[in-house]
Image (cartoon, rainbow, N blue to C red):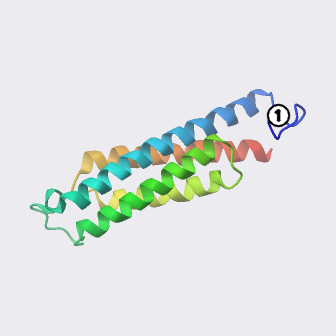
Amino acid sequence: MSSESRNDIDYSTRGMFADFTATFAGVLLVIAGGFDVLQGLSAIANDDLYAAGSEYLYKLDMTVWGTVHLVIGIVGIVVGVGITVRASWAPVCGMVVAGLAMLTNFAFLPFYPFWGIVIIAFNALVIWALSVQLRDYQH
């Protein structure tokens, strides 16, 4: 049984749009988190794959960096599920996790630029969708 009464549900267009964007953001965060998990596992399993031929301003230990991606990915999946079940803590946590994932993938751009840009775009969509959802519920 739902904790919301029928009077608490916003059936307006704005309310339905906010609900859709929240669900959309939750699903996108689960997908982006899954990509981060895969990227992290790949860096942990074969750190030479990412480090081959790279001379950049910052040197990264790929095993540690893979662990960072793995942790952010797992947290992103948990928060994404929290968003889809409408946990009260999830939208703000989702924006924080998506922002952290964007930063970690920005640092990863020299190694795999296209992949990093795709994941940054996924996380930007998550932040946009959660911002729309929060803004619409504050009105």
Name the one closer to the observer, 8 or 46: 46
On the image, the x and y values in percent for residue 2 come to 80, 36
| In-image side of 88 versus 77 (left or right) | right
Q: Residue at x 42, y 61 (%)?
A: 71
Left or right of residue 25, residue 17 in this image: right
Residue at 57% of width from left, 45% of height from top?
81
Name of the residue lying farthest toward the right = 7
- Outermost residue on the front side: it is 1
Q: Quadrant of residue 104?
A: bottom left
Give the residue drawn at x 15%, y 56%: 49
Q: Residues within 10 Å of mark 1 (few under 14, many from 20)?
A: few
Q: Quadrant of residue 23?
A: top right
x 66%, y 42%: residue: 85
Question: Height in image: 53 above or below 116?
Answer: below
What percent of the width, then of the height, locates residue 125? 50, 42
Task: Check disc 1 and give the amino acid type.
Answer: Ile
From the image, tell me which residue sits under label 1: 9
